[in-house]
Amino acid sequence: MTTAVQTVAVLFARAARLPLPMTRGDIGWTLPISQRWFGHRAEKATWLYIVGIKPNRIPRLPIVLGEATHICGASGRRHDGHRLHRGDPGWRPEITKAERELTPPALAAWLVALARCSERTRDPAPEAAS
């Protein structure tokens, strides 16, 4: 079943002319990740558009299975759109707005490692003009 969040993500990708996850675009490819894999308390889906790095060259992803302990706002809704309440099956507490905006330090470090894998960063530095 496709969720509203997935539908919005696909519409955004089309509007931004980004390839859908794990497909190639003109110069790069889209990698879907969850920030939870890097220590976020909620299942926070994120798409990365990667240029200059082949899929088999990215740093190892610390994939985490199972449910997150918390949710990001709208993900606390049932399929009919109604919000879950404490005591309802499947209810989990929401993270704060401030927490939604933060990048887990482990993800920041992974992104730096990813940048270091880029073809451009492996090219020899041009010689300084004399």
Image (cartoon, grey):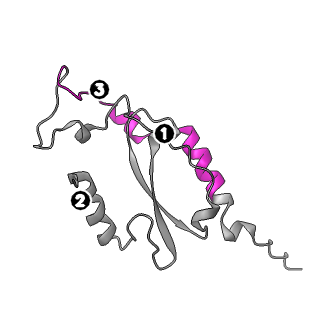
Q: From the image, state whether disc 1 or disc 2 is nearer to you.
A: 1
The first of marks 1 and 2 along the sequence is 2
- The Cα–Cα distance between marks 3 and 2, rounded to whole angstroms, is 24 Å
Q: From the image, state whether disc 3 or disc 1 is nearer to you.
A: 1
The first of marks 3 and 2 along the sequence is 2
- The stretch of residues the image draws in magenta is 87-114
Of 122 and 62, nearer the camera is 62
Q: Is residue 25 magenta?
A: no
Vertical placement of residue 17 versus 63, above or below: below
The first of marks 3 and 1 along the sequence is 1
Q: Secondary structure at mark 3?
A: loop
Report which residue position mark 1 lands on: 64
Residue found 46% across the figure and 43% down from its top:
35
Q: Amino acid at mark 2?
A: Thr
Side of 25 where 78 appears, left or right:
left
At which x and y percent is residue 21? Answer: 41, 63
Which mark is on residue 93?
3
Q: Secondary structure at mark 2?
A: helix
Side of 90 where 66 appears, left or right:
right
User: Callout 2 environment at 10 Å: few (<14), some (14 to 19), or many (20+)?
Assistant: few
Residue found 61% across the figure and 63% down from its top:
56
Of 27 and 60, nearer the camera is 60
Residue found 55% across the figure and 44% down from its top:
107
Which mark is on residue 23?
none
Report which residue position mark 2 lands on: 7
At which x and y percent is residue 41? Answer: 42, 32
Can you tell which quarter of the image residue 53 is in? bottom right
Residue found 61% across the figure and 50% down from its top:
60
Side of 116 where 102 appears, left or right:
left
Q: Amino acid at mark 1?
A: Val
